Amino acid sequence: MEKKISEEKNERSLNFLEEIIEKDLRNNINEGRVHTRFPPEPNGYLHIGHAKSICLNFGLGKKYNGKTNLRFDDTNPVKEDVEYVDSIMEDVRWLGFDWEDRLFYASDYFEQLYKYAVILIQKGKAYVCDMSAEEISETRGTPSRPGKESPYRTRSVEENLDLFTRMRAGEFPDGSKVLRAKINMASPNMHMRDPVLYRILHATHHRTGDKWCIYPMYDFAHGQSDSIERITHSICTLEFEVHRTLYDWLIREIGIYAPRQIEFARLNLSYTVMSKRKLLELVQQKKVNGWDDPRMPTICGLRRRGYTPESIRTFADIIGVAKRDNVIDMSLLEFCIREDLNKRSNRIMAILNPVKVIIDNFPEGRVEEMEAVNNPEDETKGKRHVPFSRELFIEREDFMEEPPKKFFRLFPGGEVRLRSAYILKCESVIKDLQKGEISEIHCTYDPETRSGMPQSNRKVKGTLHWVSVNHAVEAEVRLYDRLFSKENPDDAEEGKDFKDYLNPDSLKVCKGYLEPSVKNALPGEKFQFERLGYFIVDKDSTNDHLVFNRTVTLKDSWTRLEKNQ
Ligand code: ATP
Ligand code: MG
């Protein structure tokens, strides 16, 4: 699989966007310039779908020696906030991209956009309409039935100019008037049926304050902003395909530089939801602990979960770009982070569900420092010492009193190797009759089998991880799983909604016993807990109270589950 990824990276043929761009370059369209943009609306935190779009736009800019702008599409003051602006910039940077000096806001163009609207009015291509939002929607018709023309459609240019000026001046209440393009109420494309360009909204904007009380609609701001920035290829998701005719019409009628809009299929990921509205609902209703909850598909959630920018970029790269909607399996994203962390994280030993082992023939009070390899994938990571003593913790699941066949872990009379230490033999067990569970496992060790010594090659089938009881560092360990238990939570049964499919087991908190080398680990540090998965020190962690998040298990348990079902 590793080979496959690198092959796909280096040898894959051009995707359809690259083909379009290379053709334009060959034909010297836009004088050989390539200029893309990433245009988020600051009304929520970015998610993995946006990451795909970021990698795509910045990736194309880089590949063709072009430029990529970051532009906030901030035309709806009611839903937008600087908190979101700041988080978006942080996330784009963290992903590894740089907009250099090209940070823009659609709100910076409000004056220019207003002038464009005036041009349309002067050309008789736009009019002020007094119908309410309901009336406008009722008279739009249906795809098979033409709409009805507004009675205000025939207003004179002078009257329209006067009314539009007064709209801006704040003379009219919200919703009482709009500016509409005058196109064709019978167009088979609903977006061409005199779409609204401006609405009245007496609301404070996070950047322009109270300067404006009319705001451009998305369709009017977006293409015009692309044109102002001389974007060559305006890449957006498929739902905007039906807007493209309007995009081109507005640019042509205003008479300005024409970028080319190209659509690709948005990223959909199984076992999660991606719409900002739904993610906001999860946050507001406290179904998760904030936008950066490690179960969220947000970039900040993935970061806190322990994902690396490299793994997300690799993911974006291997899923490629499609022209048709599809759903990518969450396991692919998990595969990418496993591959990356396998290479970069040091191993440590930690016990999450302990049972005590007492080594009867190991002297009381003696401590041996065992040498352990930090990362078998990377020699330069070196070695560390792990204290070994008479009393150890091992995982409760690694012992069975009556083992089935092929149980290669510990059982009465059986032998296992302790990672980086000795071979251990189980002699007897002590049970807590009240709890009905084993409280101590009594063992002996074979001093001849110290790891690294020549005699240590004696073969036993299983290798277990362990932690010395007296040296163990306690930590809060948060085990995360997928947020939803349904593959497509958006596809809810009648009477239900996506929130009815939240996975009740998506977060389990337990106490872990860790080897002492992690005692001073700082937030953001990543480790592999041998046999248990990849973990990151959480931002809640302090010297007195260590907190770890599990990023991902070592193996894909979901796919195996699905296969067995
Ligand atoms: P959502 O529908 O999740 O609320 P949005 O499309 O409203 O997102 P924007 O802030 O408008 O969010 O998106 C910024 C850019 O990211 C747009 O160019 C949009 O096409 C792109 N984008 C959004 N979601 C995805 C996705 N799932 N896959 C790929 N690109 C996406
Ligand atoms: Mg949008």
Image (cartoon, rainbow, N blue to C red):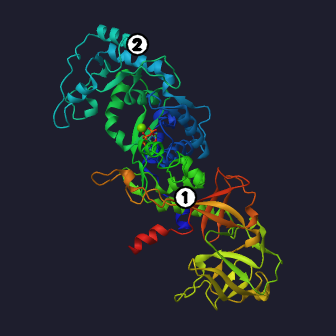
Where does residue 97 sit, x and y in percent of width and height? 59, 43
Where does residue 479 sit, x and y in percent of width and height? 56, 61
The image quadrant in which ligand 2 is located: top left
At x 52% / y 28%, what residue is drawn?
A: 105
Pointer 1: what residue?
A: 10
Q: Which quadrant would residue 157 be assigned to in this image? A: top left
At x 58% / y 35%, what residue is drawn?
A: 86
The kind of residue tagged 1 is Asn
Mark 1 vs mark 2, foreground winner is: 2
Where does residue 470 sit, x and y in percent of width and height? 76, 71
Which badge, 1 or 2, is on the more N-terminal residue? 1
Give the camera-side residue of 118 and 412. 412
Please indicate, yes or no, whether residue 528 appears anywhere in the rendered image. Answer: yes
Q: Which mark is residue 447?
A: none
Work out which residue is located at the far front of the displayed protein and give it: 434
Other-residue count near label 2 (Cα within 10 Å), few / some / many at <14 / 14–19 / ≥20:
some
Give the total number of marks visible in the rendering.
Answer: 2
Work out which residue is located at the far bottom of the displayed protein and give it: 413
Work out which residue is located at the far right of the displayed protein and give it: 366
SS of the residue at dot 2?
A: loop
